[in-house]
Image: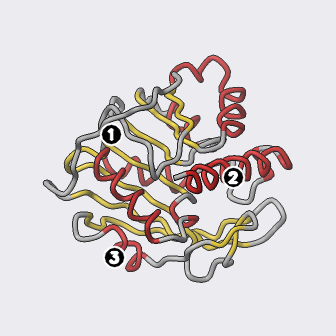
């Protein structure tokens, strides 16, 4: 357990340092406009009152886009406190409309279920099968029955590393296998993202619907969210 604690602490420091070096717009995955994510969320047809969580959202501008569109229950979870600080500063007074959680997505226990779980560029950093299984267990405990999962990872033509860390690369088929029969694939998008330094990265976006009875929906939390 002590080794796990050290690993999580090291990860937090790694991401804080990445943001400190170049700011939010300097990290490789930064987007000024998260167009595909927003379009896939709109495709689900969820209402503006639906509960949405952006896992690894940190300094992402997706939260801005969702608030602009009138979504009322948005949560951002990130391991890096620095990334959350950047996002709050950018949003100003609107930051108070968002629930902010500084935590690890593979271990956090949520107090309430969500209607939509969004993740762009977290899952592919989970190179250990046990970490991926923990992530999926948390997802199943948190997503409401028939809820929506939008997940984006490096595709098979993407670089093998990001931010000096190894990553997993997926196709829509291999992502479907990871999440299992309880998640039905609804749509797939592909994007060539250019990093701030001009390196192309292939991203695969998959929108899933969790089948009725597949989730545990027994979310509990031992941590409090900073709203």
Tag 1–tag 3 contact (CB < 8 Å): no
Name the residue that disc number 2 marks: 10
Mark 1 closeness class: few <14, some 14–19, many ≥20 residues within 10 Å: many
Residue 215 appears left or right of 69:
left
Q: Residue at x 80, y 52 (%)?
A: 26
Mark 1 and mark 3 lie on one chain; the one further toward the N terminus is 1
The residue lying toward the viewer, choosing from 196 and 107, is 107
- Percent across and percent down for residue 52 are 40, 39
Toward the viewer: 137 or 178?
A: 137
User: Image quadrant of residue 192?
Assistant: bottom right
Label 3 environment density (alpha carbons within 10 Å; few <14, some 14–19, many ≥20): few
Disc 3, SS? helix
Q: In this view, does 169 lie above or below 13?
A: below
Identify the secondary structure beneath mark 1: strand
Q: In this view, does 187 lie to the left or right of 106?
A: left
Q: Closer to us: mark 2 or mark 3? A: 2
The residue tagged 3 is 177
Query: In the visual, does 2 lie left or right of 113?
Result: right
Does residue 10 appear left or right of residue 107 in this picture?
Answer: right
**Circle 1 residue:** 114
| Count of all numbered marks drawn on residues in the image | 3
Disc 1 to disc 2, C-alpha distance: 29 Å
- What distance separates the C-alpha of mark 1 from that of mark 3? 23 Å
**Which residue is farthest front?**
2
User: Residue 206: x percent and y percent?
Assistant: 41, 65
């Amino acid at each position: 357990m002590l080794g796990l604690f050290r690993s999580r602490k090291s990860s937090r420091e790694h991401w804080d340092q990445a943001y400190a070096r170049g700011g939010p717009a300097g990290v490789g995955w930064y987007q000024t406009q998260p167009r595909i994510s927003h379009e896939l969320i709109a495709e689900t047809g969820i209402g503006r009152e639906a509960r949405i969580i952006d896992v690894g959202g940190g300094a992402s501008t997706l939260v801005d886009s969702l608030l602009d569109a009138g979504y009322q229950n948005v949560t951002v979870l990130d391991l890096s406190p620095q990334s959350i600080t950047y996002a709050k500063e950018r949003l100003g007074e609107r930051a108070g409309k968002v629930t902010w959680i500084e935590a690890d997505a593979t271990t956090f226990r949520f107090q309430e279920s969500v209607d939509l779980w969004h993740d762009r560029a977290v899952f592919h950093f989970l190179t250990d099968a046990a970490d991926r299984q923990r992530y999926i267990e948390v997802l199943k405990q948190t997503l409401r029955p028939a809820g929506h999962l939008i997940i984006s990872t490096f595709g098979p033509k993407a670089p093998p590393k990001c931010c000096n860390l190894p990553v997993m690369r997926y196709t829509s088929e291999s992502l479907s296998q990871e999440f299992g029969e309880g998640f039905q694939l609804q749509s797939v998008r592909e994007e060539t993202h250019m990093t701030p330094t001009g390196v192309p990265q292939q991203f695969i976006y998959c929108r899933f619907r969790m089948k009725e009875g597949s989730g545990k929906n027994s979310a509990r939390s031992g941590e409090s969210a900073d709203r």
